[in-house]
């Protein structure tokens, strides 16, 4: 817990973040499986084409796999960016753990900031996950991608209390 402007701020604890990330991994893996099944059926129907496509099979396999990877990246980017910049301020995993993504001032983030946060996760990943473990040791419990995007995760109850205080002060 930290003080900001005379108020207590509770940043998301590392283990709550970790569980939320695992829950989001389940959501993303489920989406990945559904897309994988649908694209496999599409591939099957392409092979049943009456024209002789077998001479281009190697190129089609590469095109198919690249297309699927691009589709997955776009879907996952939109899942995280839209959910975190929405009125919910969280993905399903974060909602389940009572966490909200906010900017440094405790306000809702924009789609652009959520996009930066999503793509910055690659920095956290290429550091052999050290970028994620940083959340357990930084003052504001921020992972590397949070620092890069200027965001942090707060406990939902504290965030709601701050919003009520701000509304009452007006």
Image (cartoon, rainbow, N blue to C red):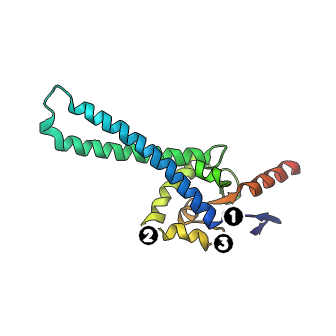
Dot 3, how many residues are within 10 Å of its Cα: few (below 14), some (14-19), or many (20+)? few
Q: Secondary structure at mark 1?
A: loop
Q: Which residue is mark 3?
A: 139
Q: Earlier in the sequence, mark 1 or mark 2?
A: 1
Dot 2, how many residues are within 10 Å of its Cα: few (below 14), some (14-19), or many (20+)? few
Measured in 3D between alpha carbons, the distance from the residue under mark 1 to the one under mark 2, in whole angstroms, is: 24 Å
Dot 1, how many residues are within 10 Å of its Cα: few (below 14), some (14-19), or many (20+)? many
Q: Nearer the viewer, residue 48 or 113?
A: 48
Left or right, 19 with respect to 45, comes to: right
C-beta proximity under 8 Å, tags 1 and 2: no
Instruction: Identify the mark at residue 11; answer none if there is no mark.
Output: 1
Q: Which percent across, then down, holds residue 98?
A: 68, 54
**Which residue is located at x 83 percent, y 50 percent?**
164
Nearer the observer: mark 3 or 1; the answer is: 1
Q: Is residue 141 above or below residue 75?
A: below
**Which residue is located at x 22 percent, y 40 percent?**
60
**Which residue is located at x 75 percent, y 64 percent?**
9
Q: Which residue is mark 2?
A: 128
Asked if one can make out residue 117 in the rendered structure from this viewpoint, the answer is no
Nearer the observer: mark 2 or 3; the answer is: 2
Measured in 3D between alpha carbons, the distance from the residue under mark 2 to the one under mark 3, in whole angstroms, is: 21 Å
Q: Is residue 29 above or below residue 134?
A: above
**Which residue is located at x 59 percent, y 68 percent?**
135
């Amino acid at each position: 817990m930290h003080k900001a402007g005379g108020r207590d701020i509770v940043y998301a604890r590392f283990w709550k973040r970790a569980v939320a990330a695992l829950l989001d991994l389940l959501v993303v893996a489920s989406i990945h499986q559904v897309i994988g099944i649908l694209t496999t059926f599409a591939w099957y129907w392409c092979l049943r084409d009456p024209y002789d496509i077998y001479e281009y099979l190697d190129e089609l396999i590469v095109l198919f796999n690249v297309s699927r990877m691009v589709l997955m990246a776009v879907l996952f980017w939109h899942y995280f960016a839209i959910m975190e910049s929405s009125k919910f301020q969280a993905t399903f995993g974060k909602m389940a753990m009572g966490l909200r993504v906010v900017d440094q001032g405790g306000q809702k983030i924009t789609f652009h900031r959520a996009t930066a946060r999503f793509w910055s996760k690659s920095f956290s990943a290429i550091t052999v996950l050290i970028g994620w473990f940083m959340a357990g040791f930084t003052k504001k419990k921020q992972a590397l991608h949070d620092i890069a995007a200027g965001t942090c995760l707060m406990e939902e109850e504290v965030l709601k209390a701050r919003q009520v205080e701000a509304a009452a002060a007006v």
